Image (tube, rainbow, N blue to C red):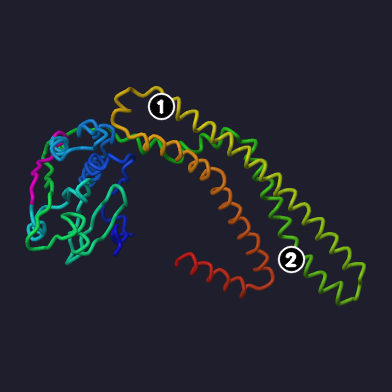
Amino acid sequence: MNTFGIKNTNFFLFPHYNQPDSKDCGPTCLKIISKHFGKNIPLKQLRELSQTTRSGSSLLNLSEAFEAVGFRTLGVKIDLQKLHEAPLPCILHWNKNHYVVLYKIKKDFFYVSDPAHGLLKYTKDEFLKHWIGNNATAETEEGIALLLEPTAKFYSSDFDIDKENQEFGFKFLTRYLFKYKSFLWQLVIGLIASSLLQLIFPFLTQSVVDVGIKNQDIHFIYLILFAQLALFIGRTAIKVIRSWILLHLSTRINISLVSDFFIKLMKLPIAFFDTRMTGDILQRINDHRRIERILTTSSLNVLFSMVNLVVFSIVLAYYSLLLFGIFMLGSVLYFCN
């Protein structure tokens, strides 16, 4: 049985946010529901309203936070039959140590926005196991839920625009990358040169067969083989230089990211550390390594693969449009699957 349910791939039905820290499931649920009703409230503000500590948020504090932003709340203990009649979305106490948002019930399937695992779909038995317990039945057992209803206060309130997610976007990442434009240009030039050398190889191989072997000209064949050897050495040299530049660039970006992180960390108030687990802070440090890989290795590998695809597509189209069409159709079907 899948512990985390079936992944719901239709992300356009209901908003979802992942909790940044292990104890932020409560305020993240509040952010998800507020977004569903049209308000984008900063998580920092919701965390303060729900009085999140190292132990998380209590259901009472979560209810008071909802009321502070303009919801009418009701904490209940109900069975599965009454849950079908409850207004959705609502918050459920999950696995006795977590909060999730139940946003849809369809037949015997329950759709949940879990801040820790994403948008999920559960069967009835799986849902009861997580909501109530391992031995729960639909007839006798009851689970804890927080029912919600937005009021006029919610729609009339002027909340701050959520800048947390806006600042951490493409612009945030590229400001670290574009600081080293000279290295980027060197990588681009190396990429173009390597692709041009690859473009020459098929034509050299063709000339060996069409000219050298056909005319039995051994000197021409030797000439082409030496040319291929020179091109291979050139490609290898370009690859080594590109790897060195990439290593140098990734090291500088990583140092910049970690330095900025520690500078910001040192400026935070003591209250910030009172509500954070040590593992959460260490995870933030490890996340910088992932950001550095996205900026350097992953993005450049994708760019290199795209350039190679274009180059060899041109060669294939030059020799046979039919083969090129079959290749493109197969590529589209492969990526669709």
Q: Position of residue 257 (x, y in %)?
A: 50, 33
Residue 93 against residue 317 in the figure, above or below: above
Q: Quadrant of residue 325?
A: bottom right
Q: What residue lies at 45% left-to-right and 27% top-to-bottom?
A: 262
Foreground residue among 103 and 20:
20
Q: Residues within 10 Å of mark 2 (few under 14, many from 20)?
A: few
Q: Quadrant of residue 129?
A: bottom left
Q: What residue lies at 32% left-to-right and 59% top-to-bottom?
A: 7
Question: Which is more foreground, mark 2 or mark 1?
Answer: 1
Figure quadrant of the C terminus: bottom left
Q: Position of residue 168 (x, y in %)?
A: 41, 37
Residue 164 tag number? none
Q: Main secondary structure of the magenta part?
A: strand
Span of residues in magenta: 68-77
**Residue 247 highlighted magenta (yes or no):** no
Q: Position of residue 144 (x, y in %)?
A: 12, 49
Foreground residue among 228 and 188:
228
**Side (left or right) of 16 relative to 282:** left
Residue 113 against residue 282 in the figure, above or below: below
Q: What residue lies at 12% left-to-right and 45% top-to-bottom?
A: 148
Identify which amino acid the numbered label 2 is placed on: Pro
- Label 1 sits on residue: 265
Foreground residue among 204 and 95:
95
- Label 2 sits on residue: 202
Give me the C-alpha separation between circle 2 and circle 1. 55 Å
For numbered disc 1, what is the local secondary structure? helix
Q: Would you say the residues marked 2 and 1 are in contact, meaning their CB atoms lie under 8 Å apart?
A: no
Q: Position of residue 37 (x, y in %)?
A: 20, 45
Identify which amino acid the numbered label 1 is placed on: Leu
Residue 274 against residue 224 in the figure, above or below: above
Q: Quadrant of residue 212?
A: bottom right
